[in-house]
Amino acid sequence: MRQVLRKTGFFLSGLMMMGLVAAGSAQAGLLFEWSYKNSSFNVGPTDVITLEATLQVLAGSTDSLIGGNLFQISFFGHSDPLNILDPYVFSSSSIFSDFAGQTILPGESFMFTFGTLNPRSGVPVPVGDYASLGASMVFKDASGSDVKFGGVGINPLDITVSNVGGNPIPEPSTMLLFGSGLAALVAWRHKRTRTS
């Protein structure tokens, strides 16, 4: 299912880009795209996930992107394998301040934090595979119209939560070997102090 979803996302992304290029040749305006730095995560049950991303204003754009014109962001959950928004709370509190005062010219890119995923109410996330259908960003262009990049199938996330790290439980044979070595060391030391 994950493979089909990812292929569908790439297909939709390709169609959207073809639409942007076609629209760009007739009336360019503001053209941009963005993506996560990492789209797959292997984390522990209490880890906070920071979603770093890069936005690029396409070279064919006739408008610059004014960061203060960030209008809306959306983050879409998923039901198969598991909805990412059940055990996590998505927070985008810093994205608007990250973009404030930024002007990104055609051909330039800008790195930012899209948001964070925090375990809901501080409760450890159950072990399993989680997914997001995608995400989107909407900016206002120079005319005040909405310009969007993203949506379902674009910028999906895959998160695997496992019991990473931790202390391994020693095997009985390891403990026996360690104990017998320690006993031999104590006996040798005791024998050595008797002969002195």
Image: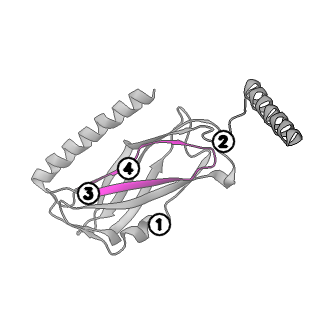
Q: Which mark is residue 140?
A: none
> What residue is rendered at 49% in x and 61% in y?
92
- The three-letter code of the residue at mark 4 reads Tyr
Q: Earlier in the sequence, mark 4 or mark 1?
A: 4
What secondary structure is marked by label 3?
Answer: strand
- The three-letter code of the residue at mark 1 reads Ser
Q: Which residue is mark 2?
A: 166
Q: How many marks?
A: 4
What secondary structure is marked by label 1?
Answer: loop
Q: Is residue 36 above or below residue 110?
A: above
Q: CA distance from mark 4 to mark 1?
A: 16 Å
Dominant secondary structure, magenta: strand
Q: Earlier in the sequence, mark 2 or mark 3?
A: 3
Where does the N terminus fall, quadrant-wise? top left
Q: Are marks 4 and 2 in contact (CB under 8 Å)?
A: no
Bounds of the magenta span? 32-56
Viewer-nearest of labels 1 and 2?
2
Q: Position of residue 107 (x, y in %)?
A: 18, 59
Near mark 3 (Cα within 10 A), the count class, few <14, some 14-19 or many ≥20, is some
Residue 99 falls left or right of residue 22: right
In the image shown, does 181 or 64 lie closer to the viewer?
181
Q: Which residue is mark 3?
A: 56
Q: Position of residue 167 (x, y in %)?
A: 68, 40
Q: Which residue is mark 4?
A: 36
What secondary structure is marked by label 2?
Answer: loop
Q: Position of residue 75 (x, y in %)?
A: 46, 50
Q: Which residue is mark 1?
A: 94
Q: CA distance from mark 1 to mark 2?
A: 32 Å
In the image shown, does 179 or 122 lie closer to the viewer?
179
Q: CA distance from mark 1 to mark 3?
A: 19 Å
Q: Residue furthest front?
A: 196
Viewer-nearest of labels 4 and 2?
2
